Amino acid sequence: MARRWLELALQTLQIQPLFPLALGRVALGPDPLTTAAMMQDVLALRGSTLSNPDPGCAWTGDLNGVWQLHRLPGFAWLREQVEAQAWAYLEALGFKLEEIALFIQRSWPVVSEEGMVVGRHHHPNAHLSAVFYLNGDGSGRGGSLRLFAPRQLNELVPGLGVGHAGPIAANHPLNAAWLDVAPEAGLLVLFPASTDHAVTLNQDADDVRLSISFDLVLSARGESAQATSASASASEYLAPHPDHWTPVSPRLS
């Protein structure tokens, strides 16, 4: 029996993480003049409004009529970067790029003063989300992007990992409820738009957190009626290209 236990002790258990959420990260590093111009434009677009609308919530352009930032000339450089990195992200996930079309649906600035947060949410209207940080030193004091796990698969007993002196070690990497991404100037992150996320409290009295969010949507390619079999197959699972949509007339009262 003792020999059997010794044999078992000499065996090493290997843990293989499965089903990873794909977080794309790339340091774009625009030149300081481009960054300064975008920061100035964002603050000008915010105007005198500071929050959204609760005083503890960061100001977000999408709720204040500023949701097409990528169409403004001052953000043309950023739009090109997001487009290129979005294609790279999809390719890394195994998408056949020749069978899909990709659209920037909307983009908006987020301005977070000290003591402000963005609550937990996701973007049901989109497929892919991206965030670009205009400033940040990597410390997270200005407020980190918090990505939530849809479910803690490794807690074994549902609800056990919520805390309250439970038997799972806090912040264990195989039982984490979320991952925090600290802003860094020039950093672009991409992730599935269905992922619940939030922005943690800005604890930096000397800095205003500035970021730009993007929502992107996938569709089938916009080929003619003589579409290839490959593109026709993609259309079965994706929305047809908007060129093929027909608007419905408004309902008459």
Image: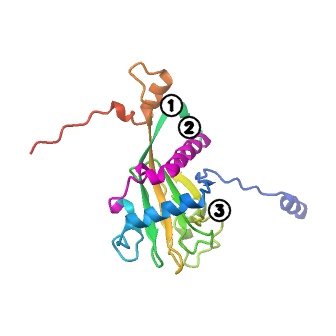
The residue carrying pointer 1 sits among few (fewer than 14), some (14 to 19) or many (20 or more) residues within 10 Å by Cα, namely some
Task: Name the quarter where the C terminus is drawn.
Answer: top left
- Majority secondary structure of magenta residues: helix
Residue 91 sits above or below residue 64 on the image: above
Q: Is residue 67 left or right of residue 137?
A: left
Q: Quadrant of the N terminus?
A: bottom right
The residue beneath circle 3 is 174
Which of the two residues, 56 or 8, is positioned nearer the viewer here? 56
| Front tag of 1 and 3 | 1
Residue 247 found in image quarter: top left
Whole-percent x, y for residue 115 in the image: 46, 79
> Crowdedness of circle 3 by 10 Å Cα count: few (<14), some, many (20+)?
few
Extreme-left residue of the structure: 253
Mark 1 or mark 3: whose residue is earlier in sequence = 1
Q: Amino acid at mark 2?
A: Phe
Q: Along the line of sight, which residue is nearer the eye, 96 or 76? A: 76
Residue found 51% across the figure and 70% down from its top: 209
Residue 95 tag number: 2
Q: Is residue 76 magenta?
A: yes
Q: Position of residue 49 (x, y in %)?
A: 35, 72
Residues packed near mark 2 inside 10 Å, few (<14), some (14 to 19) or many (20 plus): few
Highlighted magenta segment, given as a residue range: 63-92
What label does residue 99 carry, if any? Answer: 1
The reply to whether the C-beta atoms of the residues labelled 2 and 1 are less than 8 Å apart is yes
* Residue type for callout 1: Glu
Q: Position of residue 193 (x, y in %)?
A: 47, 52
- Sequence-first disc among 2 and 3: 2
